[in-house]
Image: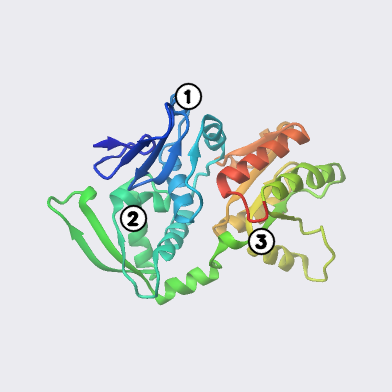
Amino acid sequence: METCPVCKLNDEQIVIKKLSIIGEKIECPRCKNFSILDRVAFTIPNLKFGTKLSAWIRERNEQGAEPPQITTDLLEELQSGLPDRSPREKQIILLQNIERKTTYPSEAITIIPKFDFPLAWASNDPEFIFYIKSLTERGFLRRTDEVKVGLSRLDTLKFFVTITADGWDYLEKQERHIEERTQAFVAMSFAEDLKPIWKGPISNAITKAGYKPHRVDAEPHIDRIDIKIISEIKNSRFVVADITEQKRGVYFEAGYALGLGLPVIWCVRKDDLENAHFDTRQYNHIVWETESDLEDQLYDFICAIIGKGKGD
């Protein structure tokens, strides 16, 4: 049996094919499909992903994107860019992934915790099972069966789950097909000295990655400003939150996006990093000093975490 170099699963279903002397194509029942163009990348000191790298690869597969090609540069970008999901976010992501597998309402989807816990960005089988049970208790899923093969061990557990009517309503509120959105909402200080940052590196990076940057003051409107902000965030694929100058509105907009399950990319100027609010310090931040530094890092983050948009 082969062992997956990412999730470390040892299983007879794993297939590893040589692409070159140092390149490999991997098929894993947990991570799904990806390639490694440089095995040496996994020997880089201090690279610690836990299960997040497997979850990221699985997510790209579930979304129908091209299987990732793992390189040293990509791993270094992901090291600082992969988000730490909250339990709420993990449940939303899991329900969305079950939706993707569902071809018609009432269809029972097979879930095997041993292989499928990356669907919720969970750390292990027990955490994943907790989210399945939580979604069931909330009325969003219905378990139609539970099977244990052989001994009562987690690695033999299998669920059959169906999205309920309440689950479909909840997904509708989360606005299905989020991947099709092309707008990126930018939350940042409107200070004059930061305008060049908005018009230059932030807009450039978002546009180059294939999305349309939007800042709420960028176009005239007659709506109430709070309604306009909420509406534009709901219409966005992700949010870029630059917390330089520590504006409360930026934290509100980023928090609202997180509540909707949208990815948030955090940025801050280096000399203001120590002032970042305690509640956001667990998130990775793009720490920038120059405009070119911000543009390069933001573009890399968008491509690695969100994926390139259709406009690219």
Q: Name the residue under label 3.
A: 233
In the rendered structure, which amino acid carries the disc numbered 3?
Ile
Query: Could you tell me which residue is drawn at 67 percent across and 34 percent down?
Result: 287
* Residue 269 at least partly seen: no
Q: Which of marks 2 and 3 is nearer the N terminus?
A: 2
In-image side of 156 versus 205 (left or right): left
Of residue 269 and residue 151, the one placed in the foreground of this image is 151
Q: Which of 42 and 127 is in front in this view?
A: 42
Viewer-nearest residue: 26 or 107: 26
In the drawing, what numbered circle is on residue 44? 1
Disc 2 residue type?
Answer: Phe
Residue type at mark 1: give it. Answer: Ile
Residue 246, image x, y percentages: 72, 44
Residue 72 in the figure: left or right of residue 238: left
Where's residue 221, x and y in %?
A: 82, 68
Crowding at dot 3, Cα within 10 Å, few <14 / some 14-19 / many 20+, comes out as: many
Element type at marker 3?
helix
Structural distance between the alpha carbons of marks 3 and 1: 37 Å
**Does residue 23 sit above or below 145 in this rendering?**
above
Q: Can residue 80 be seen in this view?
A: yes
